Image (spheres, coloured by chain):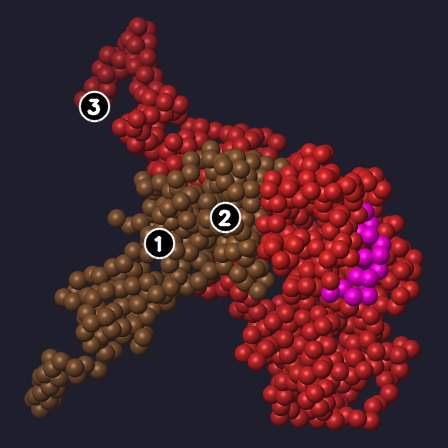
């Protein structure tokens, strides 16, 4: 009996000793240097309809103090208004990256998603990632924009849809060009869509849409343009983020 | 003793005489009346109303907001729609747009929608329990509630209760309804849209009556085991068959196959050797020039799928079909399958050999590698037939000896209102209708291995779209007043007449073009093409279609029609497809240089048409609309004139903006455009 007890005590000490020595833990290897920063690799600044999954997954990367990717760092996400992550917690892979699928919240507006990791001394390191949820009207504007406006205002070409952007003398502004479009007042924005470029002394290459689209279509387009503006249209605009 | 005495004293003190009794009763009544406001004070909605008043107190527009605020329970009652909603008791700011930047519920204004909140109420779109006055009961967030709030993810389902038309704002609903037709769900499930029309399938499962001429038993075996292993885009779902079941079904399908009537066996050719490299190269060119890729996809060297999705993917076609069948199919697909969407190209023998030879080199030998099927026995064939009958193969495919079963799967007309009590949930899953529908579509057999519904290969977005379309199929939708129902464009079974009609069916014009509301959407609507086009140009176009929009990936192929066929088609289109809105000869364009010059000015300055169209290839760059370099040879003057005055009236949904152009501007522009003739360039 005493022998067994002595053996048990010896094992316990050996175990404690082994565990107290750094670098010999049998569990998952912690990052070589503690995480110092977390950055968004891809999947930020996406646009989706309220309550729906974003098209692309959100990929974040944890870096150590030297800027090298930190493997094995824990990452977790927080957001509000029913924004969901699948998964919302995990550990970075060997490339220091972690991927999650995001379903955006149920209220239309700008969202700030917080991604966290634990840095040196148990301190929480975080990054805020911007995403955008469109309500019914803005989404309607997005559909109309894809059909009527994108051919010229979207400078990106695909094999299915070649952009006409570079064929024009007056270079159309992308709808996310907040620096330019935010300066236009609401009546001006509605006027240039309704009556064409010459209504504001701009190029006739922008045709009038007042007879093609009805008033609510044009209001939807304007709402969409305001929603996707970068920087945001109103500086005091509500941003859904956890306090 | 003393207690009885004391009680008697109290009774005497309170009700001793009539004045005392009256006073006491009056006091009691007052006390009872006081309880009502006291109880209300602790109601949830009252708490929200107080916190709303607190929220607006400090604002600049506090006075206006306070004036519009009314305490108490707010109810919207719309008997016609069966709506009794009290949501506005807590959602107090639904119409206060100035509170746009408030981020806390329930005080957000309702986002802009095309409908009036007073006219439709809340629960019609959001579902939930309209009459309830507590958060939990109204939102039905407790478990196993029959109709909880509709998750925002599937919101467009609400629009689908009235709208059968394709709304711009409901892409997911539209896609979901299209998927129900495209994936053939409605072969097995009956689904009647709320306005009464049954959804019809939009896929085309081939007849299997002559399948042994087309392919081998080995290929059938591998295909029915896992269609997606052959082509990731295959429509046919995976029935998760065992090897033995696949063996018996393939044996049965080969045994029931009969020769094509009147076709006979194609003559066996004596050069079954692989085509030379030069021939394969020429075949590849012929494949491209015939625009096969408009409908069929094929993997390129990098493994990317390139091409359309009207017909099946052709990456492994050489493994799938027998060479002789392939050659005869390309010669005239209608001979094997009269219902096919594939046009009857009039290829000569040389072209046939080149294209069939090229496609024959597109093989996936791994798909049927190492397969040894022993000769089928009679019991195996009988078992295969039994399986094919039970599994409903004949719902989609024509099979000799099996009649098409009716109502093979549950009716989905009111699936969006299916009571939770009638649903058997899988263990551990969220117990809501949307979650059930999504899980059922994603992995049908997770609800039981004996279930018949096969495994489809769908993305998350596609599943969401399906669920959105199914959730629109509610009891409420069928009971709504008819005036609210917006019917979509009705399905048309238009058939062109006479010899031209036969020709159009042979060439399958409707696979790509829509005419009189029937047909595909890949190519322009031809309903009024007869008012638009010039005879000479159309005749030449049939002989050589490469002249219009040469850079488009999907384009009209050259069908090699004869001169006589081109005349038949042209004359039919010119007479049958004319708009009643105006006469072909109703406009004579001016031909003097002053009018033409004025049109030129309008074209380049006022209307900036060169942004989208090219008239002068040296100078113009616009590439949205068709090239107009020879439009004076192509289009009819009256059509151009009317088109300029209102393009959507002639072709609804066209991208060209409606300018409501004045008569004189339209006349000058028409003069300029009619002067753009090929001979002048």
- Location of residue B244 in the rendering, given as x and y in whole percent from the top left corner: 65, 85
Residue B540 on the magenta segment: yes
Q: Which residues are magenta?
A: B529-546
Give the quarter of the image for residue B201.
bottom right
Name the chain letter of the residue that bears numbered label 1: A
In this rendering, does residue B437 appear at all? no
Q: Is A228 or B546 nearer to us in this picture?
A: B546
Q: Is B60 or A219 nearer to us in this picture?
A: A219
Please identify, in this view, whether the residue under mark 3 or under mark 2 is nearer the observer. Answer: 2
Q: Quick one: SS at disc 3?
A: helix
Q: Which residue is mark 1?
A: A130
Do residues under tags 3 and 2 come within 8 Å of each other at their CB atoms?
A: no
Q: Colour of chain B?
A: red
How many marks the image carries: the answer is 3
Do residues under tags 2 and 1 come within 8 Å of each other at their CB atoms?
A: no
The residue sitting at the front extreme is: B593
Q: Quadrant of the N terminus of chain B?
A: top left
Q: Which residue is mark 3?
A: B3
Q: Residue at x 64, y 44 (%)?
A: B603
The chain in brown: A
Q: Residue at x 52, y 42 (%)?
A: A203
Q: Quick one: SS at disc 2?
A: loop
Q: Quadrant of the C terminus of chain B?
A: bottom right
Q: Is residue A153 left or right of residue A129?
A: right
Q: Which residue is mark 2?
A: A170
């Amino acid at each position: 009996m005493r022998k067994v007890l002595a053996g048990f005590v010896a094992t316990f000490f050996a175990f404690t000793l082994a565990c107290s020595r750094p670098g010999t833990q049998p569990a998952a290897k912690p990052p070589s240097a503690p995480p110092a920063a977390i950055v968004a690799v891809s999947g930020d600044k996406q646009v989706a309809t309220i309550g729906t999954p974003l098209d692309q997954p959100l990929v974040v990367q944890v870096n150590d103090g030297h800027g090298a990717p930190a493997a094995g760092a824990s990452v977790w996400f927080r957001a509000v208004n029913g924004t969901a992550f699948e998964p919302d917690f995990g550990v970075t892979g060997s490339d220091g990256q972690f991927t999650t699928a995001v379903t955006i919240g149920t209220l239309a507006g700008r969202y700030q998603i917080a991604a966290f990791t634990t840095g040196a001394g148990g301190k929480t390191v975080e990054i805020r990632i911007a995403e955008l949820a469109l309500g019914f009207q803005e989404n309607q504007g997005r559909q109309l924009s894809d059909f009527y406006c994108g051919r010229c205002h979207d400078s990106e070409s695909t094999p299915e849809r070649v952009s006409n952007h570079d064929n024009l003398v007056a270079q159309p502004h992308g709808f996310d060009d907040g620096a330019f479009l935010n300066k236009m007042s609401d009546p001006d924005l509605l006027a240039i869509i309704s009556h064409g470029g010459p209504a504001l002394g701009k190029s006739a290459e922008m045709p009038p849409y007042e007879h093609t689209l009805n008033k609510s279509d044009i209001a939807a387009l304007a709402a969409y343009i305001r929603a996707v503006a970068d920087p945001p249209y109103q500086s005091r605009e509500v941003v859904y983020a956890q306090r | 003793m003393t207690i009885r005495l004391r009680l008697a004293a109290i009774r005497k003190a309170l009700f001793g005489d009539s004045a005392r009794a009256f006073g006491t009763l009056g006091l009691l009544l007052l006390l009872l009346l006081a309880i009502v406001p006291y109880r209300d004070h602790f109601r949830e909605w009252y708490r929200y109303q107080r916190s709303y008043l607190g929220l607006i107190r400090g604002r600049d527009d506090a006075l206006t907001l306070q004036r519009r605020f009314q305490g108490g329970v707010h109810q919207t009652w719309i008997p016609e729609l069966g709506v009794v909603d009290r949501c506005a008791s807590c959602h107090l700011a639904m119409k206060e747009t100035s509170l746009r930047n408030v981020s806390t519920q329930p005080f957000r204004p309702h986002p802009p929608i095309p409908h009036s909140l007073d006219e439709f109420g809340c629960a019609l779109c959001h579902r939930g329990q309209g009459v309830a006055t507590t958060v939990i009961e109204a939102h039905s967030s407790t478990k196993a509630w029959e109709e909880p709030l509709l998750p925002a993810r599937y919101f467009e389902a609400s629009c689908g209760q009235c709208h059968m038309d394709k709304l711009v704002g409901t892409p997911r609903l539209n896609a979901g309804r299209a998927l129900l037709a495209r994936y053939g769900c409605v072969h097995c499930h009956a689904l009647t849209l709320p306005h009464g029309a049954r959804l019809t399938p939009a896929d085309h499962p081939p007849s299997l009556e002559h399948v042994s001429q087309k392919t081998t038993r080995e290929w059938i075996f591998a295909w029915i085991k896992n269609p997606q292993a052959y082509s990731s885009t295959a429509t046919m779902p995976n029935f998760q068959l065992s090897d033995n079941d696949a063996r018996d079904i393939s044996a049965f399908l080969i045994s029931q196959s009969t020769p094509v009537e009147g076709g006979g066996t194609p003559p066996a050719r004596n050069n079954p050797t692989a085509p030379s490299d030069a021939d394969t190269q020429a075949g590849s060119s012929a494949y491209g020039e015939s625009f096969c890729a408009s409908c069929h996809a094929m993997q390129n060297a990098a493994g990317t799928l390139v091409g359309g999705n009207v017909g099946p993917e052709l990456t492994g076609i050489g493994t799938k079909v027998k060479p002789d069948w392939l050659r005869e199919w390309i010669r005239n697909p209608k001979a094997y399958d009269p219902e096919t969407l594939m046009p009857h190209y009039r290829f000569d023998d040389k072209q046939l050999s080149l294209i069939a030879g090229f496609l024959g080199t597109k093989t996936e030998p791994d798909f049927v590698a190492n397969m040894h099927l022993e000769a089928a026995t009679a019991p195996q064939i009988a078992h295969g037939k039994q399986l094919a009958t039970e599994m409903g193969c004949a719902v989609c495919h024509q099979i000799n000896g099996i009649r098409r079963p009716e109502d093979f799967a549950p009716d989905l007309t009111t699936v969006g209102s299916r009571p939770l009590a009638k649903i058997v949930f899988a263990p551990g899953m969220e117990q809501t209708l949307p979650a059930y529908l999504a899980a059922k579509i994603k992995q049908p057999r997770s609800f039981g291995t004996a279930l018949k519904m096969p495994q489809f290969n769908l993305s998350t977005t596609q599943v969401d779209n399906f669920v959105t379309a199914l959730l629109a199929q509610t009891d409420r939708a069928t009971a709504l007043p008819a005036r609210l129902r917006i019917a979509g464009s009705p399905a048309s079974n238009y058939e062109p007449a006479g010899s031209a009609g036969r020709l159009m069916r042979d060439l399958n014009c409707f696979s790509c073009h829509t005419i009189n509301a029937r047909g595909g959407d890949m190519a322009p609507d031809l309903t009024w093409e007869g008012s638009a086009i010039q005879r000479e140009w159309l005749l030449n176009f049939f002989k050589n279609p490469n002249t219009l929009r040469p850079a488009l990936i999907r384009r009209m192929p050259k069908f090699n029609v004869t001169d006589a066929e081109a005349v038949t088609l042209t004359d039919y289109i010119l007479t049958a497809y004319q708009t009643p809105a105006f006469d072909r000869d109703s406009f004579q364009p001016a031909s003097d240089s002053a009018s033409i010059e004025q049109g030129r000015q309008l074209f380049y300055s006022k209307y900036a048409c060169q942004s989208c169209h090219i008239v002068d290839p040296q100078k113009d760059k616009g590439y949205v609309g068709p090239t107009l370099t020879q439009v004076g040879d192509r289009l009819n003057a009256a059509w151009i004139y009317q088109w300029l005055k209102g393009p959507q009236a002639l072709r609804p949904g066209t991208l060209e903006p409606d300018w409501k152009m004045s008569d004189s501007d339209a006349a000058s522009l028409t003069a300029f455009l009619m002067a753009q003739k090929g001979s002048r360039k």
